[in-house]
Image: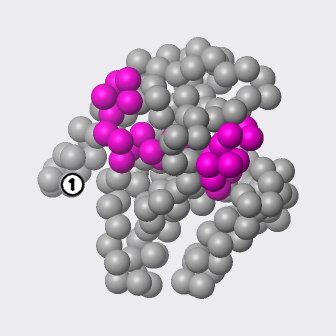
Amino acid sequence: MNEREINRKTNDMKINNLYDLAGDKNGRGREVVYRHCQEVANYALVLAKLYANKTGIKLDEELIYTGAMVHDIGCLSTKTEKGKAVTHGEDGYWWLKSQEVDEKIARFCLSHVGTGFSREEAIEKGLNSDLNHLPVTTEEIIVAYADKFFSKSGKKHTAEEIEEKMKEYGEESFKRWEEMKGLFECLGI
């Protein structure tokens, strides 16, 4: 086993430990959330490689993988009221911070819901407006983008379905989706 494989195996053990600690307080099903996060992680890594090939900029693939694998842990770690699913990102962020997970990783929880939220949108949705809910790094943008293509039911979404969903989050979210989509289309991805 090479060093990269050893690091991934160690990282996977830490991720599984976080899932075990999170439990399933929301009844979503550990396997369902974990499978969804694996699908997002796999697609995000493909996007990262394509991005690197097109731009010459190498991204932190281990950060992308880890962030994608825990981005929805808030679905398990807290009991979210029906209709308040928008809070699972912030719930996951705070839960990961309570487990002493690095800020760079915890931020993937905050920044993946919809296309992230501006301060004004966070206030409107009852979220903590002192936190930055927008994807900032290219790694965060890739995971937020990849997440939109996979449902927890196992269905892969089309671009048209994603656009309709982003419209539900509001005009600003839809504009950010168009920007994300444009970035990847511009790169031929």
Work out whether 121 lies above or below 186: above
Residue 154 visible, this orientation? no
Amino acid type shown at disc 1: Arg
Work out whether 127 lies above or below 160: above
Instruction: Estimate the x, y position of residue 23 in percent, counting from the top left.
Output: 50, 16
Work out whether 43 lies above or below 56: above
The residue indicated by pointer 1 is 4
Residue 109 included in the magenta stretch of the image: yes
Q: Viewer-proximal residue, 42 or 19?
A: 19
Work out whether 93 lies above or below 95: below
Identified at 21% across, 46% down, the residue is: 7
Identified at 51% across, 62% down, the residue is: 142
- Name the secondary structure under disc 1: helix
Identified at 55% across, 29% down, the residue is: 91
Identified at 48% across, 46% down, the residue is: 108
Total labels: the figure holds 1
Instruction: Estimate the x, y position of residue 65 in percent, counting from the top left.
Output: 40, 51
Q: Viewer-proximal residue, 139 or 37?
A: 139
Residue 119 included in the magenta stretch of the image: yes
Instruction: Estimate the x, y position of residue 24 in percent, counting from the top left.
Output: 56, 17
Residue 58 figure quarter: bottom left
Instruction: Estimate the x, y position of residue 13 in percent, counting from the top left.
Output: 30, 32
Q: Viewer-proximal residue, 5 or 27?
A: 27
Q: Which residues are magenta?
A: 97-125
